[in-house]
Amino acid sequence: MKRFNHILTSGVLAFLLGMIVFSCTDGNDWETNTASARLFRVNPKSISITASALTASVTWDATPETEYYIIEISKSPLTDDIIMGSQGNLIFGQDQSIRKAPYILSGLESDTEYYLRIKAVGNGKESYWSYPSDENFETTDEQILNEITAEDINGGTIRTTWDAAGLPVTHLTYQKEGETDVVRRDLTAEEIAASSATITGLELGSSYIIYIYNAETVRGMTSSAVTTEQIMNEVTDEDCTSESIRVTWNANGKNVNRLICYLKEGTTETEVINRPLTMDELNAGAATIDGLQQFSQYVIRIYNEDILRGEIEASTKLGQPVESTIEEGSLKASSVTILWNAEEIGTITGYILYKGEVTDIPQEPTEEQKALENNGKLSLDNLNPSTTYTLAIYNGKNIRSTCTFTTLKGIPADYGTPITINNADEWAAALENASGKVAIIIPQNTDIDMSANTSFRTEIPEAITSLIIWGGNDGIEYAEDEKPILGTRGLTFTGNKTEIQFFNLNIQSNGTSNYIIRQKGNGTIGKLVFESCNIRNAAGIFCARDADATGGVCTSIAFEDCVISNIGNYSVIFADGNADYTIHNISCTNSTINNVTGNIFRMKQTASYSLTISQSTFYNSSQAIIRSGVSSADIRISNTLISQVNTSSTPSQSYITGENVYTTSDCYAVTWATRTTLASNQLFVNPSGGDFSIQSEYQSTYAPYGDPRWKE
């Protein structure tokens, strides 16, 4: 019996202990919720809410290992079955901003009943919702700000008044409708005493919501957004030119009498336009402001006396690009000066110098602009010779002027310091002492005529590997009577030469019995160029007929912008098959050949070659224009005029092709040219006198062809 009682007593005791444990767990699950991974639900009994008209302050006891809290409020009762954010509920803290109590709920409606719940979040887990013991709270109906009337609004200012009701106020806040930035404006003692304050600097035609506070407590707000006054209409594209802006307004029965206009940036006091409105402008509700700076942003305000009624911003358009030119005499091999009208071009910010002829200049360049003052002039240096550039002058991203130019020829830097010579002795010394790449300068109007004396040096020694002979050193092409004279009885080149170049010279011999070049060396010449030269009075220009030249090679010979006259029986180019000298390529571009006794080109070599003639004028040659030793030459003639020339060729003309080639009636009919019915003196102004300008009545037909110099 005793044992039975003991067992009963033990069982009852165990049951009672179990009940105690169960009861403790059920009453404190905010402390022991294992599903919340060591996070604890907020104690509902610790939640306290103090509400004002538009805000509510919430406090609670902190929970351990909590990173942040989430609070949800609703105008309807909340339960665990209701999904967070449904019913249009307000949620606070999803941005993890609620780290501790207290927390102020804002944006509430006055005199409104709300329900609240709160949860803790940490370590990637959330607690259960906690609900305050008092199921709901209610905001007060305090609203001390008075309604804002039309008389309280003046342009970009709003006057506020309030009834303090004996309670303190500290500051206003205002917020542009649709934006998040809130501006605080502290109230002065005088404003608090007067129960009135004016907010200034607001954007015209914009809506604002205004609050009044005592410390952190909202004591009132505007019942709806308040819009500042703006009687000026938006400026359209049609209202703007490069020098004027037309503004319009709707006075709404209010008087206006003057306007102010000034640059948005950089305006001085003297540059502000402040003028009265005329009666015509007042009647039309429109005014045009003239004399403005192109492509600039302006602020325009309209007033009634000192009361601002409207303000807008508008920009003038960009004017047409201004022409820029090259300063006379400034274009050199490495420099140039560009000029423009500083008044017409307006504001400029910088320039970009592009290489090449750029026709599609970018409006939004990726390259950095170089600073540029608008003084109407820009000097550029350190340019590359014989290079085309395009200068673009900008105002911001907008092109204000462009200029494309090509620098003059310049002696390459690897030729070192040029040697200037003035006579035959200096010529001989230069050849004797120089080596490698050599540049020789003969000054303007200098006469070095060695054609009458056999003692003058004609051999270019092997030590010189490349030779440039220039008239002047700045790349400026002289008039015919100003080019320096180089007279010779026949230059010859010993050893290999990479390049030989004659530029801007009057090159001559002593008649039709001696040569410009009589090549006796058997080395290799890479490139032989005559540019902007007058070549005259010689048996031939390049002649390889001597046995000493056997095995020699010239890769290319070019005539560019030259006038060749009075050449004898040994042709412009003569390669005698007996010498076994080979020329691979010949070209004649933008040049005139006048009066050749022999063939113009006599190519008796056995190796094939190419001959290209373009944009040239040929006159007066009685022997076959081309005499060739091979039948497989590649000869192409284009855009060329030929007159009083024997247009036959040997052995045949089958290897000649022509395009836009025209001959006068005194030439043979050939398959590669069009024979006109005009005689030489009908086509040209004075061919026998060396004037190959096209007669005026045939300009439209034949001026596009032949040497371009005769078009000028």
Image (cartoon, helix red, strand yellow):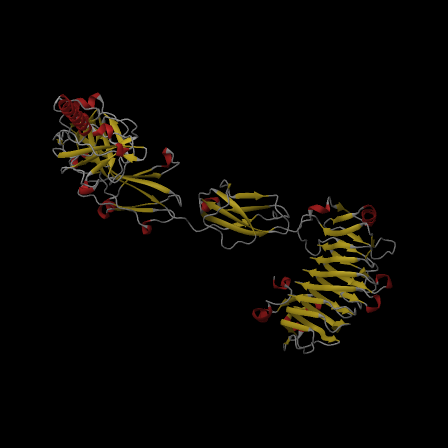
382 displayed left or right of 151? right
204 displayed left or right of 545? left
Quadrant the C terminus occupies: bottom right
The residue under the point 17% across, 23% down is 10
The residue under the point 83% across, 47% down is 429
Looking at the picture, how far across and down is residue 156, in whole percent? 25, 36
Q: Nearer the viewer, residue 257 or 230?
A: 230
Name which quarter of the figure residue 531 lies in. Answer: bottom right
Can residue 307 be seen? no
Looking at the picture, how far across and down is residue 81, in whole percent? 18, 40
Q: Nearer the viewer, residue 544 or 14?
A: 14
Looking at the picture, how far across and down is residue 511, in whole percent? 81, 63
Looking at the picture, how far across and down is residue 329, in whole percent? 61, 48
| Placement of 370 over or under 685, stated as above or below | above
Q: Nearer the viewer, residue 81 or 482?
A: 81
Quadrant the N terminus occupies: top left
Can residue 423 be seen? yes
